[in-house]
Amino acid sequence: MGRTKASCRQCRREKEKLFLKGDKCATKKCPVERRKYPPGQHGAANTRISEFGKRMREKQKAKRIYGLTETQFRNYFERAAKKTGATGQKLMELLERRLDNAVYRFGYTASRQAARQVVHHGHVMVNNRKVDIPSFEVKIGDKILIKPGILERAKDRLKEYTPPAWLSLNEDFTGDIIRLPSKDDTEKLVLESAIVEYYSR
């Protein structure tokens, strides 16, 4: 059900901007600016939250930011837990390497939600092959190409945009995966250690 909820309600539930709607989130039209409390009849009430509740909220926040279901998110966590290194960082690395996230990080779209649609509709090429699976995992050396129609709408934004250091945006607006995302490259809104604690309870 997570994907069917209005994006703005998800941000209000977390009491902060998750930037799910792209450019709208930076304007005064953002509902979080007007109503800084969760949606619902009792949303404005002051409620104390337990440590467990805080950890769960971090998990929910990350799940919403990347547009995943509960099962998908848990699967990513379980994969991360099997890898060598800090589980939280490995989790964020896996989430960042999703194709829809890479399309968003390159600046081709204003939100991950829009990036997911672009991928679903077959507008993305990876190494000259169409890939329409948002969860496709990019790797070092992959070259990303967006079809002309989508690219044309993004050009003004791309001219003033600098992608994270693990990505390289070329003069012809193709993108290269030059390394794996590090801790400094991942989503700053997410406290991954709280997510690890949530699943380790």
Image (spheres, grey):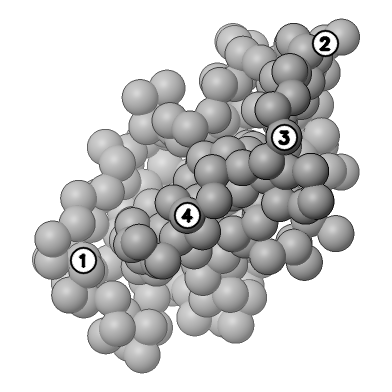
* Label 1 crowd bin: few (<14), some (14–19), many (20+), radius 10 Å: some
- Counting from the top left corner in percent of width and height, residue 8 is at 59, 59
- Counting from the top left corner in percent of width and height, residue 87 is at 65, 16
> Label 2 amino acid?
Ser
Residue at x 72% of width, y 43% of height? 43
Residue with the mark numbered 3:
45
Residue with the mark numbered 2:
200
Whether tag 2 and tag 1 are in contact, CB under 8 A, the answer is no
Residue at x 21% of width, y 76% of height? 155
Residue with the mark numbered 1:
158
> Label 3 amino acid?
Ala
The one nearer the camera, 51 or 147, is 51
> Label 4 amino acid?
Arg
> Label 1 amino acid?
Leu
Q: Is residue 75 left or right of residue 134?
A: right
Residue at x 19% of width, y 57% of height? 161
* Label 4 crowd bin: few (<14), some (14–19), many (20+), radius 10 Å: few
**Numbered disc 2: secondary structure:** loop
* Label 2 crowd bin: few (<14), some (14–19), many (20+), radius 10 Å: few
Disc ID at residue 92? none
The one nearer the camera, 4 or 117, is 4
Q: Is residue 22 left or right of residue 72?
A: left
Q: Is residue 16 above or below residue 10?
A: above
Q: Is residue 47 left or right of residue 146?
A: right
